[in-house]
Amino acid sequence: MPLFDRVPDRHTGNAEKYILRKKLFGTEDVLPMWVADMDIETPECVRDAVLRRAAQPVYGYEEMPESAFEAQMACMKKRHGLTLQREWLRYSHSVVASISTAIMAFTAPGDEVIVQPPIYPPFMKQVVHNNRTLVTNPLQRDGDGDYRFDLDDLKSKITPRTKLLLLCSPHNPVGRVWTRGELEALAALCLEHGIRVFADEIHSDLVYAPHRHVPFASLSDEVRDSTVTAVGPGKTFNVAGLAISTVAIADEAMRVRFDEVYEAIHFAQGMIFGHAGFEAAYREGEAWLDALLVHLAKNAETLESLLQRYDGIDFHPPEGTYLAWLDCRGLGFESDRELRRFFVQKAKLGLSPGISFGREGSGFMRLNFAVPTPVMDEALARLEKALVNL
């Protein structure tokens, strides 16, 4: 059976998107397409590496091997043209933890941190949890449904207390892959006002031709030296459960300050299986990734084909990520609660409500299409039936 036709059984474990169905949707009778992991088998090379490590009889403390960092650096150079140096890199168990560390390192309580909604909810939550002032610079949606940076709005909101901008690139949930020109304009404004940038680039490998990911830190040496970049294999190779990513900081002074907070929290070196899977993914997973991108693009295409046949949901296939940002305002529901109820009760699909990404997401839903072909076919059948009945 072809790889992307195989449907792994995730009901018997503790998969978050499955065990939380009753709590989040009030029923287990939904196909869960919300959490941003894949219902696709993790690459065999990763599973083999983890099993080899599991066969060793001692599961004690270990340092992350230098060969793992080297594998990541080689992959980033090959796929994105980004040159990293070993001393720039730090292990992190999650991008969200890295965001909080950067907020604590480069801002003080009361300082302003910019986010660009609609945005992955922890961007906003971590600012508030760390007693910083949240400044929203909403993305601007043009008449064609494409999102852009609103730099005029950003300029109007910058004050002497504005210290950090959280950039999502590629963007979750809207799926934009920012062009070099867009990023350069944003960078120029941040440099002018001395604003550091935390670039969450965890989806950087999940980009569809002809689009190309441009690492923010690659724009210039000056930009690089004011940027913290978060990357990792979690989304790319479906290994989020291994809890491993890295943070890249080129500027020595910024690294010193980041490390002060990093050591105070005590990130340590992660888990032994994460080390093994991380290195195998970057060293051996490229062919699997190339095949995955073809499959994901096909899923997005079939979703678009369905929605073009019905009024009510506007969908532009993402330039990156495996997340579909569905504009459902044309369905005519009076509230986000009613919209969510339609998807749960009528379509029997468990999606992420757009309103959770900020008020700019009202009337939208986010659908994760990183699923095998039979699951995608089932999801489309359910959605079509609900649209016909509506």
Image (spheres, grey):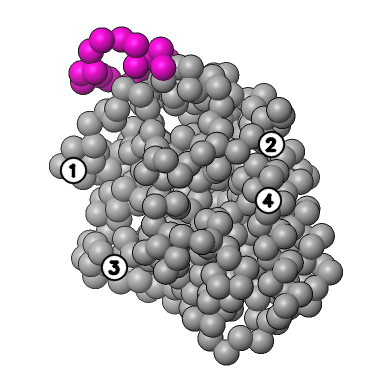
**Which residue, given by chain and number where applicable, does mark 2 sit on?**
5
- Measured Cα–Cα span from mark 1 to mark 2: 42 Å
Q: Earlier in the sequence, mark 1 or mark 2?
A: 2
Label at residue 128: 3
325 or 16: nearer the viewer: 16
Few, some or many residues within 10 Å of mark 3 (<14, 14–19, 20+): some
In the image, residue 202 lies at what x, y percent? 50, 44
Residue 339's image quarter? bottom right
Instruction: Please tell me whether the stretch drawn in magenta is mainly helix, strand or loop.
Output: loop
- Measured Cα–Cα span from mark 4 to mark 2: 10 Å
Disc 3 is placed on an element classified as: helix
Q: Amino acid at mark 3?
A: Val
Disc 2 is placed on an element classified as: helix
**Which residue, given by chain and number where applicable, does mark 1 sit on?**
265
Q: Indicate the quadrant containing the N terminus: top left, top right, bottom left or bottom right.
A: top right
Q: Earlier in the sequence, mark 1 or mark 3?
A: 3
In the image, residue 78 lies at what x, y percent? 63, 26
Q: Earlier in the sequence, mark 1 or mark 4?
A: 1
Residue at the (74%, 38%) spot, across then down: 294
